[in-house]
Image (tube, rainbow, N blue to C red):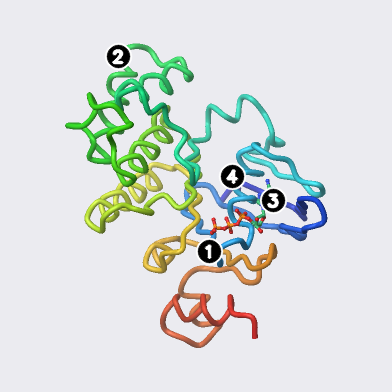
Amino acid sequence: MSSTIVIKDVSKSFGKKIVLNKVSLTVESGSIFGLIGPSGSGKTTLVKLIVGMDSPNQGNVQVLNTAVPNLKLLQKIGYMAQADALYSDLTGEENLAFFASLFKLKKKAQKERIAYAADLVNLTTDLKNKVENYSGGMKRRLSLAVALIQDPEILILDEPTVGIDPELRQSIWAELYRLKNAGKTILVTTHVMDEAEKCDRLAMVRDGEIITSGSPAELKKQYGISSLEEVFLKAGGKQ
Ligand SMILES: Nc1ncnc2c1ncn2[C@@H]1O[C@H](COP(=O)(O)OP(=O)(O)OP(=O)(O)O)[C@@H](O)[C@H]1O
């Protein structure tokens, strides 16, 4: 199995505050990898280093055997940030068309991708409405559709299902599985333990360090408990 994301000894500080401390992790191609950990533990910071939006003070990040940042990599990464980056005075469809145009999709492919992505997040009937009239959950869904628009090899999703109802969350996860089975590599951050359970591998981040990693079953075994919620509390708690 090859590795899509390789992070080696990465440290990141903001001023005097050390936010990531010698973090190393590997995400295998064609897998779903979950980053879990308490709020403020450094997950988003790590994700931003992978996408190339920020750079580490030490260590290195490679995606598809290429050092980050790299312009060509951006084409291959679909990134859904925690804060929605959408144009509120445009419609949902116009937003999708705008982001599709950044990837130079041909008109026909663009139309197909917009229809696919909108359908996936259940926004087809709202596409002609302006985003300023969307609810918070609808904006999250549109952000996910944007992340998928160019059919990227890698999906990096920072808390993708916050504000999304359980039924749609389930169908989004079904699609993430389908994408994984089609060979895509997916990294998600999540606070939701039943989502963590769906990942192939997990890394738990606390105070800028990876304190444990493994499959959900391995983590439960390691801590001798039956639910990931307990692992989260046991490993994440400051005893
Ligand atoms: N640009 C920045 N400047 C200063 N401090 C920052 C910056 N970005 C993040 N931090 C700090 O780094 C720490 C980790 O933040 P980060 O957003 O990575 O956590 P997180 O694990 O993603 O949290 P959450 O689950 O709440 O999203 C926090 O203490 C945060 O205040």
**As shown in the figure, which amino acid type bears the numbered disc 4?**
Thr
Image point 77% across, 55% down: which residue?
A: 9
**Cα distance between the residues tagged 1 and 4:** 19 Å
Image point 34% across, 53% down: which residue?
A: 163
Q: Position of residue 97 (x, y in %)?
A: 36, 20
Badge 1: few (under 14), some or many (20 or more) residues near its Cα, within 10 Å? many
Ligand 1 appears in which quadrant? bottom right
Image point 62% across, 44% down: which residue?
A: 48
Q: Circle 2 sits in a helix, a strand or a loop, which is it?
A: helix
Q: Mark 1 touching mark 3, by CB under 8 A?
A: no
**Cα distance between the residues tagged 4 and 2:** 30 Å
What residue is shown with label 3? 7
Q: Position of residue 17 (x, y in %)?
A: 77, 58
On screen, residue 180 versus residue 28, left or right, reads left
Badge 3: few (under 14), some or many (20 or more) residues near its Cα, within 10 Å? some
What residue is shown with label 4? 4
Query: Is 51 situated above or below 32?
Result: above
**Cα distance between the residues tagged 3 and 2:** 37 Å
Is the C-beta of the residue carrying label 4 under 8 Å from the nearest atom of ligand 1? no
Badge 4: few (under 14), some or many (20 or more) residues near its Cα, within 10 Å? many
**In the rendering, which numbered label is found on residue 108?**
2
**In the rendering, which numbered label is found on residue 74?**
none
What residue is shown with label 1? 36
Q: Circle 3 sits in a helix, a strand or a loop, which is it?
A: strand
Q: Quadrant of residue 68?
A: top right
**Cα distance between the residues tagged 1 and 3:** 16 Å
Numbered disc in front, either 2 or 1 = 1
Question: Among all residues in the image, which is located at the extreme left?
Answer: 125
On screen, residue 103 versus residue 165, left or right, reads right
